[in-house]
Amino acid sequence: MIITRPKPIEEILTMLEKFPTSTICVVGCGICARKIQTGDEAQVSSLVAQMRSHGLDMLDGKIVKHACSAKSWDELVDENPALAQAGILLVLSCGAGVSFLGRISGKPVLPGLNTTSIGGSLANDTIEGVCSMCGECNVGIYAGLCPKSGCPKSQVNGPCGGSSDGDCEVEGRKCIWVTIFDTLEGIGMLELLDDIKPPVCHDRRL
Amino acid sequence: MGFTDALDSGKFIVTAEVSPPRGIDISGTLAEAGQLQGLVDAVNVTDNQRAMMRMSPIVLCHKLAEAGFETIMHMTCRDRNRLALQSDLLAAHALGIYNILVMSGDYPTMGDQPSAKPVFDLDSVQLLQLIEKMNNGFDFQDGSLDSSTSLCAGAVANPGARPLAPQLLKLNKKVSAKVRFIQTQAVFDAAVFNEFADAIRSIGIPVIAGIIPLKSARSARSMNEKIPGVNISEDDIERMEAAADPVSEGLEIAAETIANIRPNCQGIHIMPIGGHGNTRRLLEMCGLD
């Protein structure tokens, strides 16, 4: 799941100043952003109402099944011919969804959210920073807890000196290395951590 | 005797820390180091410590070398990718800086440039491996260097960090990258340090224990809160509170700590709060002047 956070309305209004006055349609993404309630029906209609209160010409907001799928966009347009009148799409999805809708709709697009990490949803909590998309996944040796994303310093060979009583030196975070260590110790597999892990090869993602 | 000779000889080593300035005038820092003349085996120079922006330690180490000091340059993994790390190691060596203390580096949000990109392209283990490689004449990608480095690499450890086992996992990996010495976080509890020294004795690497003389009960409490692994006892804080002259009391406490850990380490590293005005006095109290 791609984790997103809402942009302040002031930032959206400032971005809009650079575009010619036009009819705007807010489009939420029906997958991740809907699940973590940054691009669900409530967020879409709330944003539409706020923007109308600023005097902007708004269509009723929509949810596209997947913002990163051409087929989903085509279906949405078929079901909602009024979308053709939209001069600008204000998209509540991850950055990939915004970019993709821009390519396939041919309309100017603006992001309504900031994309922060890959994570997941656990009960009512959004879990951020679960994967760093390094292109060389070896999360299995870390008890399924990736330190490249779960540790702010991406330490792959053990904790840094800032780990203290299970807390990270970065405020409000737990040291993922303590959890990795305890989990592997609990299942008798600490030797998975023995080898020195090499740095990430960043060219593999090109 | 040079620093590496001192390490090899088993001599009890004294090092002390200075920090580069936040501007372009290095005279104050050189004067600060001047107080250490004849007292220390080497002067450590920090690398944007606590993630606070300062002048590059390469320049200051070079100037200190010109003034006759042997230096230990701190190098964090926070601010440079592998290209820049290699480049700076070559630059340091060319300027007569042969001792490098490797550390992860505090996270940018701890310092005064919180929006900086945290690099951490290599971790401290991988940087130590890189130094070993460069000492063997190769760069990170196994290309040949025109000339090899001969750097003496040190690692840091935190005896008070809990849980200790994950820290030891990391430390053992650092040691396998041929570190020549281990420098510790500030020690305030001799028993904790001695337990740590016992746990790593079989490694056989010289340990230099960090020492911060307390200046006030207030700063002691603040260090307990802010520095991971630092645990200044209530007894010591009460001594500081009751003391008519807290600075002298802090030096007394430091001298007692040094006496209690001395059999279990090969040196001490003095990193005082606010300058080296009392470093000579502390070393005199310990018979290390």
Image (cartoon, coloured by chain):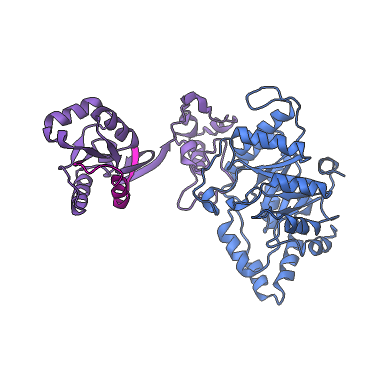
Residue A114 image position (x, y, % from top left):
35, 43
- Colour used to depict chain B in the structure image: blue
Q: Residue furthest right?
A: B1
On whether residue A8 falls in the magenta region, the answer is yes
Q: Is residue B198 visible?
A: no
Q: Quadrant of the C terminus of chain B?
A: bottom right
Residue B247 image position (x, y, % from top left):
72, 69
Q: Quadrant of residue B18?
A: bottom right
Q: Residue furthest top?
A: B143
Residue B39 image position (x, y, % from top left):
83, 55
- Residue drawn at x 46%, y 26% as measured from the top left: A205
Task: Work out whether B209 lies above or below A194.
Answer: below
- Residue drawn at x 62%, y 49% as measured from the top left: B48
Q: Nearer the viewer, residue B288 or B28?
A: B28
- Residue drawn at x 81%, y 53% as measured from the top left: B40
Q: Is residue A129 visible?
A: yes
Q: How many labels sit on residues?
A: 0
- Colour used to depict chain A in the structure image: purple
Q: Quadrant of the N terminus of chain B?
A: top right
Task: Work out whether A102 lies above or below B5.
Answer: above
**Magenta-tinted stretch:** A1-24
Q: Nearer the viewer, residue B189 or A149?
A: A149
Query: Is residue A54 left or right of A163 when viewed as pictured?
Result: left
Query: Is residue B124 left or right of B34 when viewed as pictured?
Result: left
Q: Quadrant of residue A60?
A: top left
Q: Nearer the viewer, residue A10 or A61?
A: A10
Residue B4 image position (x, y, % from top left):
81, 40
- Residue drawn at x 78%, y 50% as measured from the top left: B267
Task: Work out whether A52 lies above or below B173.
Answer: below
